[in-house]
Amino acid sequence: MLSRTAENLYWLARYVERAEYIARTIDATLRVTALPAAYIGKTNEWESALLTAGVSASFYESYQEATEQNVVEYLAFSPSNPSSIKNCIEAARLNSRSVRTALTSEMWDTINSAWIELQEVWGKGTSSREELAKFLRFVQETSLRFDGSAYRTMLRNDAYWFSRLGLHLERADNTARILDVKYHVLLPEEEHVGGPLDYYQWTSILRSVSALTAYHWVYRETLKPWLIADLLILNDTLPRSLASCYSNLVRNLDQIGVAYGRQGASQRHARGVRNRLEHSHMDDIFQHGVHEFIQEFISDNARLGEIITKQYLI
Amino acid sequence: MAVAFDEMNVPGADLRPAYRELSRWLKETPPDALEYRRQEAELLFRRIGITFAVYGDAEAQERLIPFDVIPRIISAKEWAVLERGLKQRVRALNMFLRDIYHGRDILRANIIPDDLIFQNPVFRPEMNGQDVPHDVYVHIAGIDIVRTDADNFIVLEDNARTPSGVSYMLENREIMMRLFPDLFARHRVAPVERYPDALLSTLRSVAPLSASAEPTVALMTPGVYNSAYYEHSFLADKLGIELVEGRDLIVKSDEVFMRTTEGLKRVDVIYRRVDDDFLDPLTFRPDSALGVPGLMSAYAAGNVTLANAVGTGIADDKAIYSYMPEVVKFYLGEEPILKNVPTWRCREPKDLSYVLDNLGDLVVKEVHGSGGYGMLIGPAATKATIEAFRDKLKREPEGFIAQPTLALSTCPTCTASGLAPRHVDLRPFVLTGSQQVTIVPGGLTRVALKEGSLVVNSSQGGGTKDTWILDE
């Protein structure tokens, strides 16, 4: 297939995944900030929402203060934020239009309808919490529909695999970013703190990767920070964990390698990262520093993106 | 201007037979049911994303072409005449192009003046003496046809460069079949769905000799911002070929390749929807970012077929148009089956003075214009506009032709105040391959939605209709 087509499919999936992630981040932050101050302490949760979205620096170029209104506007609707939900959906539609021939009609319909709704219903942003909740649901449903129609209607060939690569690479990056911003509340030493303060932080983390229920099914335990870290980093059964993303990246890259009869740098690099995740234990990770581990992961993941681009997309 | 011929109702006569069932059905169908389906059709168009862009209109970057749900119907007998006439005309166009870029018999026979060719900006000296596979220049032609009465089909314009609109022929039919199954059940309408297959066979048949037995065909688009982008992606999809942009292609040792995830892959036939000027920055406009450097040298080496060929603009030029009856006779020794609109060539002093004296009754068109831009419709224009045009004409007479205002035929059309006649034209698509000329029975009917308007161009507020060729 055309390199440009593969590139568009890859970015299309990334944009949709990113839009959903930003929506989840806003949603989780809304819930935490709705709690009385005694439960969440003095941290500004909107500040950390900006950090997990990776747009804190650019935010302060346009705004003075990280208030709910400012941050929601910036994350959801701002045209000047390249990762805003609005821009993600617009970029996704532009990518879709460029590769219409590689999309199934269901996928096109999902993106095109979302784009139309974005303009017609959400053109002016939201004016109440209720509307905002509706908007966030719309974004998450768009992502689910898109993912579902890709899964159910695409031929299992390189077009599908490239789109999956974009999805899992973006997802791994998102999960890693939450961990990067919130790692301090997951440190086992802080277990003794254990007050309601951290408890709500933990549920918020789990909620932003839609893993709150999953946690209880996996561990059958009350919330323990090191288990949350274990779930998000090493547990292969959780779709948004780093381990699961890399199983998928390796699998899809292998399928491309087999179909093209050639393995390359991206297959080797992805396998390297996956092996490291497979052979790690939470104890060791804590010992060597969660923060360092996550930082290294983020740069490895970005590196994989570069290698894929070089090997296939240009 | 005479009263226009209506294709359904002729005053004082019976309903025209092709429209009998439709008329009966229209009487049975309540107006709000029709309106409801009209809205449904619009929704479908939007969801599928069948849009076009209007240049210079930032508000409406992507606009829908209005779709009228009342079909336009042509009988089998009428179509048979049209089909023969179209084949004849396109055959002549191809022979004319071959001649112009080779022996130039027609110039030596003094049928067309030399300077009309050599001083014409759409004449491509690069094509002199250059052979093209199977001598086919115009693989895809869109011939604009109007009618003024029951007997005559008249060619208004030949489109021999990159004619668009065929996606509407196909999509309009899809949507009509979804919305009006009952109406289809009462007619025998010739199908159009074979068009993509016919187009692919046509393109494969003209692959260069150096191509493999399974030639690779690609559709080249200027990109998502082009007004016809939807059509490009639609056709690439239906044909199952790659939709490429200039940056996806690269020329190496006079062969054209596309960049794929598995490395470079040779391309043999390019169905290009990019104008000559933008094809190759090394040969044509150096500022073109849409093209492929070296494409023309691969073309000259005979390693790639461009469809349509480079330089076909000289055949659909409006000044050349006026010579088409002579062109048909010269190459085929036959009388033209399809008539031309009588045309005054403003470059000729006698014609110019007639045109200047009668501006208020004539349609004046730019020789190189298209899309309905830059033309004067005398009877509909204000005095000031006419005077401004008179100056333009005097300054550059060779840039214009003039024609009488035709009473284009009308068809029943949905309007805000119920069904009413509106003017229509027809663009059938003619495919020329190495062995045969194919015309899928149908075409794009454009309709001027404003009362009395004769301008059917989508860029000027025209709409489309499904075109039914009855299969009796």
Image: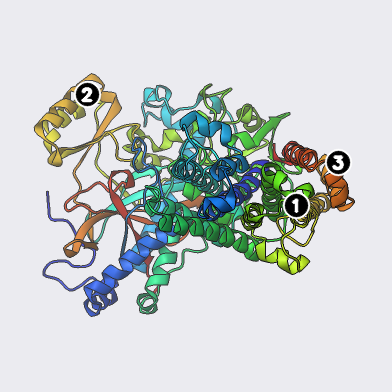
Mark 2 residue crowding within 10 angstroms, few (<14) / some (14–19) / many (20+)? few
Q: In this figure, which residue is indicated by the disc labeled 2?
A: B392
Tell me, for residue A102, which label it has, or none.
none
Q: Chain of mark 2?
A: B
**A303 displayed left or right of A75:** right
**B64 displayed left or right of A259:** left
Q: Residue at x 14, y 33 (%)?
A: B359
Q: In this figure, which residue is indicated by the disc labeled 1?
A: A192
In the image, which is nearer the foreground, mark 3 or mark 2?
3
Q: Secondary structure at mark 3?
A: helix
* Location of residue B383 by image quarter: top left
Q: Secondary structure at mark 1?
A: helix
Q: Chain of mark 3?
A: A
Q: Are marks 1 and 3 in contact (CB under 8 Å)?
A: no
Q: Residue at x 50, y 56 (%)?
A: A136
* Location of residue B423 by image quarter: bottom left
Tell me, for residue A288, which label it has, or none.
3
Q: Which residue is farthest right?
A: A279
The count of marks equals: 3
Residue B418 higher or lower than A300, as above or below: below
**B406 displayed left or right of B277:** left
Question: Which residue is more in the foreground, B193 or B345?
Answer: B193
Residue B358 higher or lower than B440, as above or below: above
Q: Percent position (x, y) of residue B196?
A: 54, 57
Q: Secondary structure at mark 2?
A: helix
Question: Which residue is more in the foreground, B54 or A306?
Answer: A306
Discs 2 and 1 lie in a common subunit: no
